Image: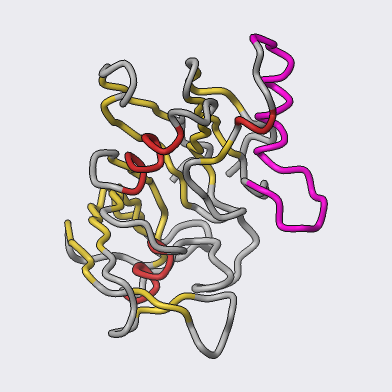
């Protein structure tokens, strides 16, 4: 199972840039000075000219450091609020593929569990009755039998219906089928996190065109 080491441009117009994020890359700075996906995207746009200013570029969505896939950037401050509203609302569909631990017996499920911060571990989120409403739709694509010393696993297609921090990881851990490679919510393993943001689709708020952006799966289930 390998992951691409360099970001790739998936889509670009005058208002929006979509980048394929590799594992291990931060989307934006955390104060450590580490080079981020936003830095890479800004350098790319500056190299293209056309009057672009680095201050115009803003990430519209976030992925955890180890999660791979589609990250969107606004390229125009005037239209950024419109894109922010699109991402925050229900008019942009965000889909993921994932490999979960164990054999999942159900075929499809809407996981409707509120998520809040874990008071005992500041790094984590948990299912909590006092948390924010959170919905994740999960469909099992394939069940993988135990083989070559690996335990049984389930290959999933997932749609986010809300956008909480670590939402997929928390919901799947609550189902007792954490994402493979998730050291925070599952079982530490010598492999990357098997969670990939592979598709977004939406009506472009400036042009009105229906846009579908896809990223190839960087690992084999």
Task: Classify 108 as above or below 131.
Answer: above
* Residue 29 is inside the magenta segment: yes
Nearer the observer, 161 or 29:
29
The magenta stretch is: 28-50
Q: Is residue 38 left or right of residue 136?
A: right
Q: Quadrant of the rendered structure where residue 85 is?
A: top left
Nearer the observer, 75 or 188:
75
Q: Among all residues in the image, which is located at the extreme bottom?
A: 120
Task: Classify 81 as above or below 98.
Answer: above
The percent coordinates of residue 188 (x first, y second) are 60, 70
The percent coordinates of residue 184 (x first, y second) are 56, 72
Nearer the observer, 145 or 14:
14
Q: Is residue 216 left or right of residue 206?
A: right
Give me the residue at 38% from left, 26% from top.
Answer: 213
* Residue 12 is inside the magenta segment: no
Give me the residue at 17% from left, 64% from top.
Answer: 106
The percent coordinates of residue 202 (x first, y second) are 28, 30
Q: Among all residues in the image, which is located at the extreme right?
A: 33
Task: Classify 100 as above or below 97.
Answer: below
Nearer the observer, 206 or 215:
206
Task: Classify 132 as above or below 144.
Answer: below
Number of disc labels: 0
């Amino acid at each position: 199972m390998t992951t691409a080491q360099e970001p790739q441009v998936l889509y670009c117009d005058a208002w929006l840039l979509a980048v394929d994020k590799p594992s291990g890359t931060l989307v934006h700075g955390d104060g450590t000075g580490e080079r981020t996906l936003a830095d890479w995207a800004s350098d790319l746009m500056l190299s293209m000219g056309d009057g672009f200013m680095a201050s115009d570029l803003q990430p519209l969505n976030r992925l955890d450091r180890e999660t791979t896939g589609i990250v969107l950037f606004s390229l125009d401050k005037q239209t950024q609020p419109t894109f922010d509203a699109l991402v925050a609302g229900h008019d942009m569909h965000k889909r993921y593929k994932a490999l979960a631990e164990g054999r999942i017996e159900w075929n499809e499920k809407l996981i409707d569990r509120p998520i809040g911060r874990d008071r005992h571990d500041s790094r984590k989120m948990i299912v909590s009755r006092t948390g924010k409403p959170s919905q994740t739709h999960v469909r099992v694509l394939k069940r993988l039998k135990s083989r070559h010393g690996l335990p049984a696993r389930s290959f999933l297609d997932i749609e986010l219906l809300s956008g909480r921090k670590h939402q997929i990881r928390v919901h799947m851990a609550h189902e007792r089928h954490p994402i493979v490679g998730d050291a925070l919510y599952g079982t530490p393993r010598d492999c990357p996190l098997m969670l990939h943001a592979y598709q977004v689709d939406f009506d472009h708020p400036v042009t009105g065109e229906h846009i579908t952006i896809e990223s190839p799966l960087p690992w084999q289930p």
